Image (spheres, rainbow, N blue to C red):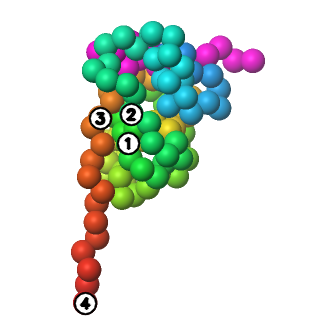
Amino acid sequence: MPAPYKITVENAGEATCYENERVLVALERAQGFGRLKNLPRKLPVGCRRGGCGVCRARVLSGNYRTDPMSRAHVSEADEAVGLVLSCAIYALGDLSLRLEAPQPHKQTPNIT
């Protein structure tokens, strides 16, 4: 079994993430064990499947793979600059990230 990866959350602490584990799960576990002490509030968690946008984060360094994420919350341009939903990414090595505030749902204009 490969060694676990270290997830460093900017200004908050560290989590341990195992192979094929969603980063959000690792963050929740770390918070439960008191390893993310500097978060201003409870870790934001919503649908857990890339649809609600609550768990937005910016990957500052490291490699990861993704499951599908709602384009209403993470556009292709967002994803290209490291904005992701932590429930939809899996670490492929050590990661550094910053938690981001959820964005309002992006609506497409009605064309009549």
Residue kind at label 4, given as amino acid type = Thr
The tag earlier along the polypeptide, 3 or 4, is 3
Q: Nearer the viewer, residue 72 or 58?
A: 72
Total tally of numbered discs in the picture:
4
> Is-magenta flag for residue 62?
no
Name the residue that disc number 2 marks.
44
Mark 1–mark 2 contact, CB under 8 Å? yes
What element does badge 4 sit on? loop
Q: Nearer the viewer, mark 3 or mark 2?
A: 2
Mark 2 Cα within 10 Å, few/some/many (few <14, many 20+)?
A: some
Q: Nearer the viewer, mark 1 or mark 4?
A: 1
Residue kind at label 2, given as amino acid type = Pro
Q: Label 4 to label 2, Cα distance in Å?
A: 37 Å
The tag earlier along the polypeptide, 1 or 4, is 1
Q: Label 3 to label 2, Cα distance in Å?
A: 10 Å
Name the residue that disc number 1 marks.
54
